[in-house]
Amino acid sequence: MTRLLLIFFIVSTLPIFSQSSYKESKLDSLKQRLHNDSLHIYRFRKARPYLNYHERNSLSDIKTVNFYGLQLGVVLFERHIVGLGHYFSTKNTKKSFTVFENEFPVTKRINIQYTSLFYQYVLINKRFFEIHLPLEIANGNMHTRYIDSLNRVYLLTDQNLFISSCGVQLILKPVKWFGLSANIGYRTSSEKLVTGYYYALGLWIGFKPVKTDLHYYLFKKRRYKEAVAELLKN
């Protein structure tokens, strides 16, 4: 009788243990798949896009020559950044100013635009900050209006500009998707008004963490949770 009861107990509980074992195995499989997906999504990448908007402000005593612009490029092996930038003169730069040319005062307005080829070496890359060493060469145009005492334009000139610069850039990342960029450097140009020290302030966007986090949390992690919920419901 005891043997019959033992056999009955084993037979009746076998499906329960079998189902529990199946669920545990399935959960382990789902966890391992999520882990593998995470390793793939957050893997080291040889190349990724780079975007930076900033304003460059001169430290010249002669004339304020400030620019704003956008840099688009690519980050290679997490150490090298190359790309193109384009810059425009700010409103303050376009204001009238007086300088001495051939010992005579001359009032004029300038408007500068230029396109640059830039390279940045990532010296330090930590979770909350980065330090870069930027180098840049650029070519552009300076449009000048000469103004008389009655505020009338009496001469227009266009001048081709060559600009080169180097400096140090600091990026602060309070969150890994977005940060602030600041750098200081020195630029030389065929136009002496542009030559001199400058500082730049701007915004930094972390394309890599934005893309990887969206992919992981909105797709992979959500599908994992849905699969687990469906498994436990049955």
Image (cartoon, grey):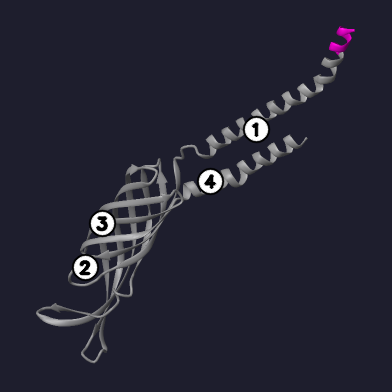
Quarter-of-image position of residue 10? top right
Dot 4: element = helix
| Disc with the residue nearer the chain's start (4 vs 1) | 1
* Amino acid on which the number 4 mark rests in the picture: Asp
The residue carrying pointer 4 sits among few (fewer than 14), some (14 to 19) or many (20 or more) residues within 10 Å by Cα, namely some
Give the x, y percent position of residue 85. Answer: 37, 59
Disc assigned to residue 126: none
Cα–Cα gap, marks 1 and 3? 50 Å
From the viewer's perspective, is residue 146 above or below residue 164?
below
* Amino acid on which the number 3 mark rests in the picture: Ile
**Comparing labels 1 and 3, the label whose residue is closer to the camera:** 1
- Label 2 sits on residue: 191
- The rendered magenta stretch, by its main secondary structure, is classed as helix
* Amino acid on which the number 1 mark rests in the picture: Leu
| Disc with the residue nearer the chain's start (2 vs 1) | 1
| Disc with the residue nearer the chain's start (4 vs 2) | 2
From the viewer's perspective, is residue 64 above or below residue 84?
below
Quadrant (top left/top right/bottom left/bottom right) for the C terminus:
top right
Give the x, y percent position of residue 204. Answer: 40, 55
Magenta stretch: give its range: 1-7
Cα–Cα gap, marks 4 and 3? 32 Å
Cα–Cα gap, marks 2 and 1? 64 Å
- Label 4 sits on residue: 213
- Could you tell me which residue is drawn at 25 percent across and 53 percent down? 167
Disc assigned to residue 30: 1
